[in-house]
Amino acid sequence: MVDVATDIEIKQIEIEQLYPYIQVGFDGDEELLELYKLREPDGTLEDLVADNILNAIDFAKENDVKCFSLNIDGIGIGFTVLSKDFLYSFGLNIYCRDKETVLDWFGWVKKGLGADFRVVLYKENTRAINFFLRNGMEVFNEDEKVIYLILK
């Protein structure tokens, strides 16, 4: 995959290196933590990070995944986990979510995965769902807990 973002440095890393990038990707995002608490009432930011890394490791056992660190000026700001045609997991620090940075990141994802890639999100994550819908993705399925989006 090729970097297309102007300010973001996107580097492939091993899954074992993912933890600090997940941590910084979620740090300070109180809304995300509140969404997590809907599923895990006593959950903390550390629990959210730990759950995310464990889920990525489990997913990687059965799927070919590529993990990426997101950096600006050498400082970690988030992460992305991709599979063949699937945006599995992602996080960008709330203080780095300006329109240009987020759209640069999404452009990189689209270029790397191509048409028809999918993402699955918990239904309560309306902020992310709305972002993807505004940027060309469509709902193709849903159940009680999650919504499935595809880029057409």
Image: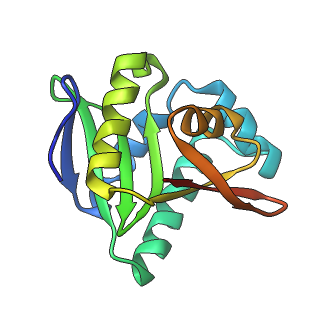
Seen at 16% across and 29% down, the residue is 74
In percent of width and height, residue 99 lies at 42, 18
Which of the 4 image quarters holds residue 104?
top left
Query: Is residue 10 visible to us here?
Result: yes
- Residue sitting at the far bottom: 62
Instruction: Decide: is 113 above or below 48.
Output: below
Is 82 or 137 nearer to us in this picture? 137
Image point 20% across, 23% down: which residue?
Answer: 7
Place residue 23 in its image quadrant: top left
Q: Residue 25 appears at what percent x and percent y?
A: 43, 35
Residue at (53% x, 65% y) in the render: 55
> What colour scheme does the image use?
rainbow
Side (left or right) of 84 relative to 140? left
Residue 41 visible in the displayed image: no
Residue 54 horizontal side relative to residue 142, left or right: left
Residue nearest the observer in this picture, 57 or 132:
132
- Outermost residue on the front side: it is 152
Q: Give the answer, above or below, for where 113 lies relative to 76.
A: below
Please tell me in which quadrant of the rendered image residue 21 appears.
top left
**In the displayed structure, would residue 77 be above or below residue 89?**
above
Residue 76 left/right relative to 92: left
Q: Residue at x 19, y 36 (%)?
A: 4
The image position of residue 79, as x and y in percent, is: 36, 44
